[in-house]
Image (spheres, rainbow, N blue to C red):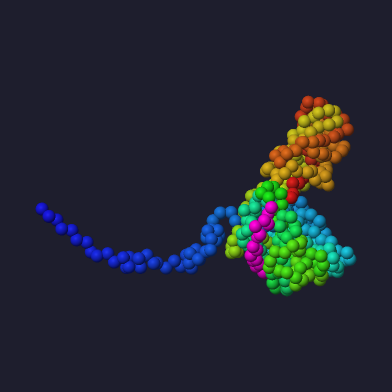
Amino acid sequence: MTVNVTKPALNIREKLAELDKPSGIAGEAMLRADSVQEQRNLIGAGRKNLIINGAMQVDQRNSGATVTGPNGFSLDRMFSFWTSASGGTVTVAQSALGNAKSIKIIATSAVTDLTGGNLVYPIYYEAESQDVYHLNGSNVTVSFTVETNWAGKLAIAFHNSANNRSYVVDADVISGTNNVAVVVPLESNTTLTNNNLIGFTFNIASCNEGTYRTSTTGSWISGFMVCSTATTQWAKTSGNFVNITGLQIELGSVATDFEHRSYGEELALCQRYYYKIDSAQNNSNYQRFAVVSCETATNAEALFVHPVTMRAVPSLETTLYSGFHIFSANAVRVLNGGMSIDQASPYSAGIALTVASGLTSGFVGLLDADNNKTAQIAFNAEL
């Protein structure tokens, strides 16, 4: 028996037309993206923000207190520096901008001399090489929210790891809240090494009218420059301020929404470079800091295991530790000397301690805070 089977003709053009469905605005953006990285940014895939503490949440050193004229880290990972030959007071503190924490820098009295090497250097960030080495030769986008009470041009500058190449650009700001985004093309050797040293640095809102400014913007030049000849020297007016939050650097030429991280995660990232134990913060009498091994009647060693692996062998913040005693064999022995690192690594540190007398060799004890709640100790492995 013969069976005849027939099939309707297939119109390939019609079938292809059925596949041409509208993709919508989001789909069109995905199709037009220049790179896979831009597609990842559009859908929010993966970790993107290369800045630590860009939400300005962590302030281990000052706990939100206002600092006048620091030459060091104001908030964690945010370095501030200024010097002027005549006059001027600048303060920095953790603040708020909308619902977010921020870093606020105020010229509480006018900085009158910004010539030569005198400058205001409010936010300076050092990125670790192995975090940014892969960005060489690529475009990166730096974005942040900034509040000012003045209108003009806000300086943004990038520097290579040797600090002998600079890229300076100005962002126009108005009095009020501004969203700033700048694309910076990194050079092929911006970050020279792939290790735990400095990769690149950048600064925001710097002021200078001498050594560290340039008329060239939007391209890499030789030298260390922090602003342009068009930059508004905002610190020359008393009461002017810059208030920044949501600081982000990401791969690509598109500024995407700020990547929020939990406070705990951000704190752990900061502790790679610095951490402090402070009994006053915990409102704790006799807070335990470390286990102690008694070596002689007057000498002992405390073991500190760092909460995270630190960037390098840390130093001890000698200006901080105070208010300690050793509790051993049911007796309190007050420290009568300073502390010093005996043996240390990125994982742990042994701290040498001294008392007048009364320890028993071979016994163990505890390094405790006195009951005045002022004891604190800090380890520093900053770049």
Is residue 376 found inside the magenta-colored segment of the image? no
Image coordinates of residue 332 in percent, x first then y, are 82, 33
In the image, residue 380 above or below residue 27: above
Name the residue nearer the viewer: 307 or 32: 32
Which residue range is magenta in the image? 177-192
Count of number-bearing discs: 0
Residue at the (69%, 59%) spot, across then down: 101
Name the residue nearer the viewer: 145 or 290: 145
- Does the rendering let one see residue 149? no
Residue at the (68%, 43%) spot, across then down: 309
In the image, residue 13 above or below residue 61: below
Name the residue nearer the viewer: 202 or 359: 202
The quadrant where residue 65 appears: bottom right
Residue at the (75%, 53%) spot, across then down: 63
Image coordinates of residue 111 in percent, x first then y, are 84, 67
Image coordinates of residue 356 in percent, x first then y, are 88, 33
Residue at the (87%, 37%) spot, across then down: 336
- Does the rendering let one see residue 184? yes
In the image, residue 238 above or below residue 53: below
Taking the image as shown, residue 307 lies to the left or right of residue 360, namely left
The quadrant where residue 105 appears: bottom right
Taking the image as shown, residue 212 lies to the left or right of residue 58, namely right
The quadrant where residue 247 appears: bottom right
Image coordinates of residue 97 in percent, x first then y, are 69, 64
